[in-house]
Amino acid sequence: MSLAQVDQTWRYYYPEFKENAGNNLYFRLENNNFVKNNEYFGNYIEGYTLMGYTAQPSLVYYAGSRLRIKAGVHVIQFSGMNEFTEVLPTFSIHTKLTDKLDLIMGGLKGDVHHRLIEPLFDPENQYTRPIENGFQFVYTSDKLWLDTWVDWEQFIFLGDDKPEKFTAGFSTEYTLTKPESDFSLSIPGQLVATHLGGQISNYSERMQSLANLATGLKMSYNIGEGFIRDIGIATYFVTYHDLTAQSGWDFTNGSAIYPVAEVNYKYGTLMTGFWRAHNFLAPKGNSIFQSTSNYQPGYYTEYRNLITSKLSFTKTFMKQIKFSAMIETYYDVPASQFDYSYGINLVFTPNFFISKVKFD
C-alpha cells in the first residue's frame, strides 16, 4: 500500500529481475502512450497539457542467475512535433549481490519506484526526465525495504561553463508488524538532495545544495479480495533545508505536515490528504505544493493549506497491455482556488525470448 502517492509503478520501464533466466537473451519493448491535462489557474504553476508516447526497445541478457545487462534506446515524441522530442541511449547492469541486496549501475530503477511522496518527487518526471543514470542499492526483506541512489544529471569537464548537477536520494520503510498480519504498521523515511555546482566548472553562479526530508507513520488494514481491498491512513512530517543559503529566497528552512487517507479498490485507488506547509521548497516535487511560484519571479506565500484528492482506475488486458485513468484535484484553502488534472495511459510491454547464449 503506497499511501500519499497512488501506485503507478507498473507503467514504468524498469523490468523485474528474473532469477531463473540464466543465459537467456530477450528483446523487450516498453511503450507508454499518454495524455495528461493539467488545469491549473493559481499563482504557483500554470496549466499545460502533455500528450504523446515513449518507446524503449532494448536487448536484455542474463549472464547467469545474478547479473543482467540491458541496452537500448529511449525515445519521446510529444504530439504536434515533427521530430522526436528526445532520443536517449540506455544501458544498465543489474546484479544481485545477495538474495536481498541489489546493485544497479547505469540506467536506474527510478521515478515512482523510489516510493517518494508527490511533494518531494513529481510523478510527471516519467515524461520530462524518464531516465535516471548513476548507481543504486535496493534492499528488500520481510521487515525492511531500502532504496538509495545517485542520479548524475549533468557531467562536466575542466573549464566547462555549465554546472555539475546530481540528485542523491534515500527511501526506506520499516514494517513493525508481522508480514502475515492483515494490519500493517510501518515507519517511512525519505531524503532527496539536489546539488548544483562543481569545483572544476567556470559556471558563474554560486553553488547550491538543497535537501528535503520526510518521515511519519503509516497504518493499513487488508480487507480481502472483494471490491474494497484495503484501507489506510498515514501522516508525513516533511522538511526543507537550503544547505548553502544560496537559493535566493529569504528563508533557508521550512516544514510541512501531510496527513492522508487511502482506499484501494479492485480497479485502483481513492486518496485524499491535507498539505499544510511553511516556507517549503522541493526542487524535484510537484510545483503545486511549493511556497514559491515556478513561473512568477519573486512570488511567495509563507503558509500553504492544500486539500488534495486522487482517483485512479487501472485495467490489465493480457499481461503486457495495461490501461489507466487518473483524476487529481487540489484546493488551495486560503485562496479559494480549485485546480485539477486528468489523464490516461496505455502501456504495452512485450518481452520476446530470442535465444540461449552461454556466458563464460
Image: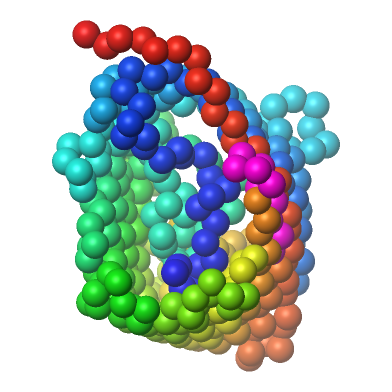
For the stretch drawn in magenta, what is the main secondary structure? strand
The answer to whether 157 appears left or right of 264 in the picture is left
Q: Position of residue 260 (x, y in %)?
A: 49, 82
Q: Nearer the viewer, residue 154 or 208?
A: 154
Work out whether 160 lies above or below 292: above
Work out whether 14 lies above or below 329: above
Q: Nearer the viewer, residue 198 or 54?
A: 54
Q: Residue at x 62, y 69 (%)?
A: 266
Q: Position of residue 245 (x, y in %)?
A: 31, 64
Q: Position of residue 96 (x, y in %)?
A: 23, 36
The answer to whether 61 appears left or right of 54 in the picture is left
The answer to whether 161 appears left or right of 89 in the picture is left
Q: Position of residue 259 (x, y in %)?
A: 45, 85
Q: Is residue 115 visible?
A: yes
Where the N terminus falls, by quadrant? bottom left
Q: Residue at x 66, y 59 (%)?
A: 314
Where the C terminus falls, by quadrant? top left
Work out whether 203 lies above or below 1: above
Q: Residue furthest right?
A: 80
Q: Residue furthest left?
A: 98
User: Magenta segment, which residues?
Assistant: 317-326
The answer to whether 221 appears left or right of 180 in the picture is right
Q: Is residue 153 magenta?
A: no
